[in-house]
Image (cartoon, helix red, strand yellow):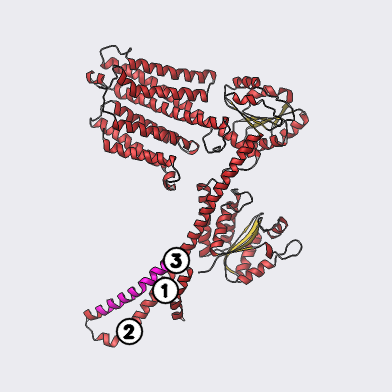
């Protein structure tokens, strides 16, 4: 991990968070350009990741996974958290910060199976890239889901203090659905790429690997959520709950699972 | 530099029959501006004339002339309008203009039209060539202050009235009404208000159902909607996004089962329901259905209360902003003015120095180059050091707006001139 550029990125992300959390103490000029700050930080983040990959300090592992996860969330932030959806910044920015912060403090664990694999072939970046895009989509979807539940509660419980200052239910529902769909497609393709990677680089059977099975269960969970939406029209709170639980499971798989189970994906 | 004057009357000070006699159209404003300057009453001027106010902003040359001009106007019973007028000078005038343009002085605080009216007044004055250095600067700053108020406070955001409260709730659910259909059941006054506000907010289609069909046709025509037979009201529940009830029925006419059926048809897209009738027309139990968002008269009242509180808070913030901008504007003006005086003082001091050197030129001519240069730089340094303290005090007095200090410091130089 290149610590210094990452710390710079972390500081910039914190500025973004501060602009959303305490708008009163942040100068107006900065508040208006918070997306630009986020974009600069994200570019630095990408550059750091790419630099690591090109100059060989990069090994697929827990730190990189968390770092890329944080980047994905920030890209999602830049894409949606403005105008009426501004309030999303309060949810997405901390997610990106916690993720990157964790990356900086956890021990550098790399995926053990790959040390044994004969070559890190072309499928590896595709596999990782797609899965991280999926995680970013699910992260966005669940953050939007939390906000959806909040706005829904305000309306149902007749708390009108913030009426007109929060994104509308329909727009939140649209974003949570689209980002979930995006995450699902990326996850599906990512699992496929993982299969190709395993076939190419691992001799043993991988299909019964605990992490693979767990990920398939998560995949199925989202499949049900999307089917309920597309076939039955179940949306709103329904989608939000699926999304929040699904992302929780996803985070557990990314961080916790590897330490609990022996898997081809375990960090050494 | 001249002083600033704002004089006029508004809905705060004058009844409508006085205001309407004072109001002028563009042609008349031009004519007045010509006269005010032609007769030597003002150096610069512009006039804001709307149905709620008539105001003259000016750099006056003769206040009595302006007073006389105002005195020409009479109220509806031939009485003098003097008692309706307010006069503001300098910073108070600047503050007043900023307040007006920022819609803090409007009948409906935060309404957006006034800024356009002020802009128009400025344009007319510009075309009549009645804006000079001071008012140009002032009007430019006014537009930027009004913009700041609009973007930095929430003054223009919340609106008044039960109809708008309904629209605010609808927007919180739907984001926009452009692709939404509403069903108005019954034609009670409040129901019509909400329907009217929604149509105004861009509602796609309004369907009206009333016990007496003729009345629904009338109301539908008023809002450009469609009338349907009251008996078919339940069929339409599944086809609309908004339901507004305002009938005289004494018990609920829409129950949970109706809503469950409707939601299935609309694939669980949210249904926004406003019940404005007392006793209620929509079964309150419907609010327990996840996708149905039901609000009654009391809820709308509370939305309005929240809006009012918000407007009050926003107005306080806006007033603080405007006051701050006004005193900064005056401080800048005073700095510019003092800058000009400082220029004059330095020139005068330099002139004195050269005169004194000339007076001793016979002696000085006997000095060699090196000695002459020493005298030259010594006298320069003396002048500079003598002025240094005064200039600094002038500058800081300008910043702090201490006009008496400025006067005292400038006085000896003025006497010197004469």
Which of these two is toward me, B149 or B319?
B319
| Segment colored magenta | B373-395
Tell which circle, 2 or 1, labels the residue nearer the N-terminal end: 1
Q: Secondary structure at mark 1?
A: helix
Residue B361, percent across and down?
29, 86
Q: Is residue A232 left or right of residue B17?
A: left
Q: Where is mark 1, residue-wise?
A: B344
The mark nearer the N terminus, 3 or 2, is 2
- Residue bearing the label numbered 2: B358
* Residue A227 at x, y percent in the picture: 49, 18
Residue A128, x across and y down, in percent: 32, 24
Q: Is residue A23 left or right of residue B9?
A: left
A48 displayed left or right of B318: left
Residue found 53% across the figure and 65% down from its top: B132
- The residue that appears at 60% across and 38% down in the rendered structure is B303
**Callout 2 environment at 10 Å: few (<14), some (14 to 19), or many (20+)?**
few
Vertical side of B384 occupied by A121: above or below: above
């Amino acid at each position: 991990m290149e610590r210094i550029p990452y710390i710079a990125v972390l500081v910039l992300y914190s500025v973004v968070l501060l602009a959303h959390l305490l708008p009163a103490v942040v100068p107006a000029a900065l508040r208006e350009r918070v997306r630009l700050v986020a974009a600069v930080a994200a570019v630095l983040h990408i550059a750091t990741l790419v630099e690591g990959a090109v100059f060989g300090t990069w090994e697929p592992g827990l730190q990189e996974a968390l770092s890329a996860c944080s980047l994905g969330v920030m890209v999602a932030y830049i894409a949606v958290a403005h105008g009426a959806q501004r309030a999303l910044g309060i949810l997405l920015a901390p997610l990106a910060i916690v993720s990157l912060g964790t990356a900086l403090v956890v021990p550098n664990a790399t995926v053990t199976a790959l040390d044994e694999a004969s070559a890190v072939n072309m499928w590896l970046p595709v596999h990782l890239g797609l899965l991280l895009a999926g995680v970013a989509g699910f992260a966005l979807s669940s953050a939007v889901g939390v906000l959806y539940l909040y706005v829904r509660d305000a309306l149902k419980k007749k708390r009108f203090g913030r009426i007109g200052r929060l994104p509308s239910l329909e727009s939140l529902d649209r974003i949570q659905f689209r980002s979930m769909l995006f995450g699902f497609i990326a996850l599906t393709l990512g699992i496929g790429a993982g299969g190709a990677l395993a076939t190419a680089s691992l001799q043993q059977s991988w299909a019964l690997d605990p992490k693979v099975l767990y990920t398939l269960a998560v995949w199925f969970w989202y499949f049900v959520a999307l089917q309920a939406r597309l076939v039955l029209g179940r949306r709103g709170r329904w989608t939000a709950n699926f999304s929040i639980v699904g992302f929780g499971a996803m985070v557990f798989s990314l961080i916790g699972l590897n330490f609990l189970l022996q898997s081809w994906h375990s960090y050494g | 530099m001249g002083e600033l004057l704002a004089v006029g009357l508004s809905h705060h000070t004058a009844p409508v029959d006085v205001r309407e006699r004072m109001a002028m159209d563009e042609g008349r404003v031009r004519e007045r501006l010509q006269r005010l300057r032609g007769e030597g009453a003002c150096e610069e001027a512009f006039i804001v004339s709307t149905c709620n106010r008539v105001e003259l902003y000016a750099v006056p040359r003769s206040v009595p002339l302006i007073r006389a001009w105002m005195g020409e106007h009479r109220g509806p019973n031939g009485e003098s309008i003097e008692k309706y007028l307010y006069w503001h000078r300098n910073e108070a005038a600047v503050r007043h203009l900023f307040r007006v343009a920022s819609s803090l002085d409007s009948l409906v605080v935060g309404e957006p039209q006034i800024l356009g009216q002020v802009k128009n007044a400025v344009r007319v004055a510009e075309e009549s060539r009645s804006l000079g250095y001071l008012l140009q600067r002032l009007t430019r700053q006014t537009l930027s202050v009004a913009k700041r108020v609009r973007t930095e406070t929430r003054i223009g955001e919340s609106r008044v009235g039960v109809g708008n409260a309904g629209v605010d709730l609808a927007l919180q659910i739907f984001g926009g009404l452009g692709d939404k259909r509403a069903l108005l059941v019954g034609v009670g006054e409040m129901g019509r208000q909400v329907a009217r506000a929604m149509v105004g907010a861009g509602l796609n289609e309004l369907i009206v159902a009333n016990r007496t069909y003729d009345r629904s046709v009338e109301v539908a025509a008023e809002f450009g909607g469609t009338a349907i037979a009251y008996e078919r009201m339940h069929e339409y529940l599944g086809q609309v996004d908004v339901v507004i009830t305002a009938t005289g029925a004494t018990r609920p006419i829409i129950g949970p089962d109706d809503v469950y059926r409707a939601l299935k048809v609309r694939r669980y897209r949210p249904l926004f329901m406003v019940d404005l009738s007392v006793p209620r027309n929509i079964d309150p139990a419907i609010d327990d259905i996840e996708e149905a968002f039901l609000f009654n008269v009391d809820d709308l009242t509370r939305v309005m209360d929240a809006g009012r509180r918000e407007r009050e808070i926003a107005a306080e913030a806006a007033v603080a902003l405007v006051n701050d901008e006004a005193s900064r504007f005056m401080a800048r003006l005073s700095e510019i003015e003092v800058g000009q005086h400082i220029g004059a003082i330095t020139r005068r001091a330099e002139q004195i120095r050269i005169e004194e050197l000339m007076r001793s030129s016979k002696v000085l001519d006997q000095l060699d180059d090196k000695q002459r240069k020493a005298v030259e730089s010594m006298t320069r340094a003396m002048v500079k050091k003598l002025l240094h303290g005064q200039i600094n005090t002038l500058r800081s007095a300008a910043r702090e707006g201490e006009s008496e200090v400025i006067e005292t410091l400038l006085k000896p130089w003025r006497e010197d001139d004469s």
